[in-house]
Amino acid sequence: MKVIHLNGSGSWGGNEQQMADIIPELEKLGITNIVMGRPNAPLQAYCLENNIPFIEAKDGKLSRKKNFRFLKEIVNSEKPNMLHLHSSDSVTLFTISDLLYNLKTPTVFSKKGMGRSMSTLSIYKYNYKNINRIICVSEAVKKSMEQEVMKKKNREKLVVIYDGINVSRLVPVREENLKTLFNIPSEKQLIGNIANHAPAKDLPTLLRMMHHLVYSLKKTNVHLVQIGEFTGMTEEIKVLQNELGLMDYVTFTDFQNNATDFLPQFDVCVMSSEREGLPLTIYEAFYKRVPVASTKSGGIPEVIVDGENGFLAEVGDFKMLAEKTIQILEDQTLQEQFRKNSYKLFMDKFNASKTAEHTLNLYKNLQ
């Protein structure tokens, strides 16, 4: 079986990491994988490094007009059994190309999360008749799609396949000590967060949590290390950091290669997201045996049972998030419970090999 994966992202995020996790596992199951994407993007570099065939989109982006015919030419020459769409612009490309040229190829789309709003065009393309299945990363995403996007007749197209981590990539490469690398006092307990600077990650709530922790709860022997790519939002986040008096309590590192190597140095991993499908960072923390406190965003409550393998707080509730974080930091028995239960859950359900098996079964059912 041959599958062409389409992804138009110019940066590296959860969608791209999940492709990197699942493609090697699909190869083990006998699938030939080809990726079409944006030239000079991190995804292309990954594919070249790992000998995965990569087709460059014309004019720099998937949604350019030249790619409508180009996709038809690729389908004619490669004769794939399946097209797998991994980004919103790949859905746009497929929909227009199929309307113009009748691609006649089974197609699935992976939906990782939900935005605050959905345009009329987006609703149309997600309901497009020749997208055969939409893979939702969590039950929460599936429910949102049912309620906000999909026409009643198309809701049967929605299926849930949880993302999985390819543990082979979690073998440590970087051995630096975070406290040494970023001049953090050695006596501080590390609160860690890995998230790009995007609205959905709600980093202002994370900062307000730190302010409450330090100034209201008087927990001053802590330091937040926030790892994630800087964006146009970064400046206002840093302004808030200064306004809250957190210059000595928070370090923003920008993007870091092999960021997951630093996870075991976190005393607790804290997620403050406002909107999520199901962030890979939580799975990675489970595997690395790092206790997690998180908001109840998206599908996160599907993998964290409050008080059993982690802690949950309502979205935006920085006070509760701070209180949960302190409980973890000050209770070693609780830490060990969360580590043990989360690791077992990961190994049982969230390994990329299982995701690949479920995905292959879906492909086969559409042939």
Image (cartoon, rainbow, N blue to C red):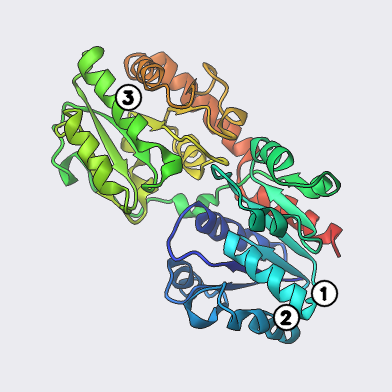
The first of marks 2 and 1 along the sequence is 2
> In front here: 337 or 8?
8
Helix or strand or loop: what does disc 2 sit on? helix
Is 65 on the left-hand or right-hand side of 213? right
Q: Looking at the image, do the residues carrying marks 2 and 1 touch, with CB atoms under 8 Å apart?
A: yes
- Dot 1: within a 10 Å radius of its alpha carbon, few (fewer than 14), some, or many (20 or more) residues? few
How many numbered discs, if any?
Answer: 3
Looking at the picture, does residue 307 appear above or below residue 144? above
Dot label at residue 21: none
Looking at the picture, does residue 227 appear above or below residue 169? above
- What x and y, as percent, mark residue 43? 48, 67
Residue at the disc numbered 3: 209
Residue at the disc numbered 2: 75
Looking at the picture, does residue 146 appear above or below residue 128? above
Examine the rendering and report whether any part of residue 286 can be seen.
yes
- What x and y, as percent, mark residue 158? 76, 47
- What x and y, as percent, mark residue 23? 61, 62
The first of marks 3 and 1 along the sequence is 1
Helix or strand or loop: what does disc 1 sit on? loop
- What x and y, as percent, mark residue 326? 33, 17
- Tell me the distance, in whole angstroms, between the alpha carbons under discs 2 and 1: 9 Å
Is 353 on the left-hand or right-hand side of 11? right
> Could you tell me which quadrant the N terminus lies in?
bottom right
Looking at the picture, does residue 194 appear above or below residue 290? below
At a point 58% along the width and 44% down the height, the residue shown is 114
> In front here: 21 or 71?
71
Residue at the disc numbered 1: 104
At a point 27% along the width and 19% down the height, the residue shown is 213
Quarter of the image where one finds residue 239: top left
The first of marks 3 and 2 along the sequence is 2
Amino acid type at circle 3 is Met
At a point 61% along the width and 46% down the height, the residue shown is 163
